[in-house]
Image (cartoon, rainbow, N blue to C red):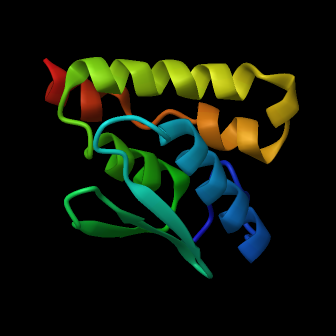
Amino acid sequence: MADPALGPVRTMRQHLIVAATVNAVCSGLPGAPKVNALKDGWLMTGAAGASAQCQTLDELWSAVLGCFPDASVVDRLNGRRLAYAADPANAGLPARAAGLLPDAEHYQGDSA
């Protein structure tokens, strides 16, 4: 499946970079999930043990955001994502992976 951040041809290396990016951005937040790379996407496992298999970065970030019911934690996560994407050390795929925001309505409704 094509992904806006990864393009039409995806590699395991890209999936590993995205998983590492998401894990780095979420590290230390209460309820942070763990993301593992798969050959065709990612497996996100929440702190409570629930898991979701995601095929696009949008699906992945939506699943990750769903792990954080507290609006203040979602705000911290989004701030971390933007800072990670803006850091020149994370140029390229890590910046795209961190900066790609899923549909804002998905998580704004949850945090209201």
- Residue occupying the point 26% across, 44% down: 66
Single out the residue that lies furthest toward the front. 28
Q: Residue at position x 33%, y 52% from top?
A: 63
Residue drawn at x 80%, y 35% is 90
Q: In the figure, residue 20 lies in which quadrant?
A: bottom right
Q: Quadrant of the N terminus?
A: bottom right
Count of numbered tags: 0
**Does residue 11 appear in the picture of this structure?**
no
Residue 17 location in percent, x, y?
72, 57
Q: Position of residue 77 (x, y in %)?
A: 43, 28
Estimate the x, y position of residue 10 in percent, counting from the top left.
73, 70
Q: Kindly give the residue lying farthest to the bottom in the view shown.
A: 39
Asked which quadrant contains residue 43, the reply is bottom left
Looking at the image, residue 93 sits to the left or right of residue 100; the answer is right
76 with respect to 39 (left or right): left
Q: Residue at x 60, y 58 (%)?
A: 19
Instruction: Report the side of 96 relative to 27 (left or right).
Output: right
**Which quadrant: the C terminus?**
top left
Q: Is residue 3 above or below residue 5?
A: below
Q: Is residue 75 above or below residue 81?
A: above
Viewer-proximal residue, 51 or 5?
A: 51
Inspect this view and state whether residue 40 appears: yes
Quadrant of residue 72 within the rendered picture = top left
* In the rendered image, the vertical position of residue 88 relative to residue 93, given as above or below: above
Q: Position of residue 13 (x, y in %)?
A: 78, 69
